[in-house]
């Protein structure tokens, strides 16, 4: 999470704005259809994250980037926003929680259908 938070604050992350400067072969469009994906677009406008934007609006009604990126309350809200949305990841989607294998799910050693190695 710290890495994504830092990437968002510095503008060096998985966004079109960064790719345009550093990785010119990458697509700079936002998956929502916006022609040039920017940090401001993601935080303030992108419809993909509207459902969670209230997290940011609790700190800054108009989602002011200086308030969100530079104040203690703003950074806390930004962290919560990132956790809930998956923004500033390569896929732009929240990470899937890994399921834990429990004993009952483990295959039996004597399973008749199991292939022998």
Image (cartoon, helix red, strand yellow):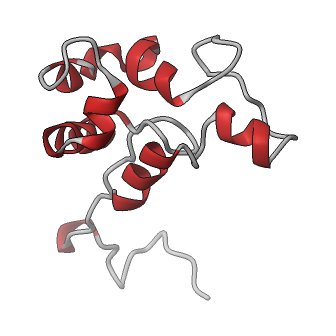
Residue drawn at the location 42% of the way across and 60% of the way down: 3
- Residue 22, horizontal then vertical, whole percent: 77, 48
Q: Report the label total.
A: 0
What x and y, as percent, mark residue 23? 80, 47
Which corner quadrant holds the N terminus?
A: bottom left
User: Which picture quadrant has residue 27?
Assistant: top right
Camera-nearest residue between 74 and 99: 74
The residue sitting at 16% across, 46% down in the picture is: 72
Query: 46 or 69: which is nearer to us?
Result: 69
The residue located at (37%, 47%) in the rendering is 96
Q: Is 52 displayed left or right of 16 in the figure?
A: left
On screen, residue 67 versus residue 90, left or right, reads left
Q: Residue furthest bottom?
A: 117
Instruction: State the quadrant of the C terminus.
Output: bottom right
Q: Quadrant of residue 109?
A: bottom left
Q: Is residue 76 above or below residue 42?
A: below
In the image: residue 117, left or right of residue 80: right
The x, y position of residue 91, in whole percent, is 55, 39
């Amino acid at each position: 999470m710290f890495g994504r938070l830092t990437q968002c604050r510095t503008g060096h992350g998985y966004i079109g704005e960064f790719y345009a400067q550093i990785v010119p072969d990458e697509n700079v469009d936002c998956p929502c259809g916006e022609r040039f994906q920017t940090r401001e677009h993601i935080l303030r406008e992108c419809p993909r994250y509207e459902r969670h934007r209230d997290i940011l609006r609790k700190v800054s009604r108009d989602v002011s980037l200086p308030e969100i990126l530079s104040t203690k309350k703003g950074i806390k809200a930004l962290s919560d926003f990132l956790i809930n949305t998956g923004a500033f990841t390569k896929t732009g989607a929240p990470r899937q929680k890994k399921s834990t294998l429990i004993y009952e799910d483990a295959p039996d050693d004597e399973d008749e259908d199991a292939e022998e190695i």
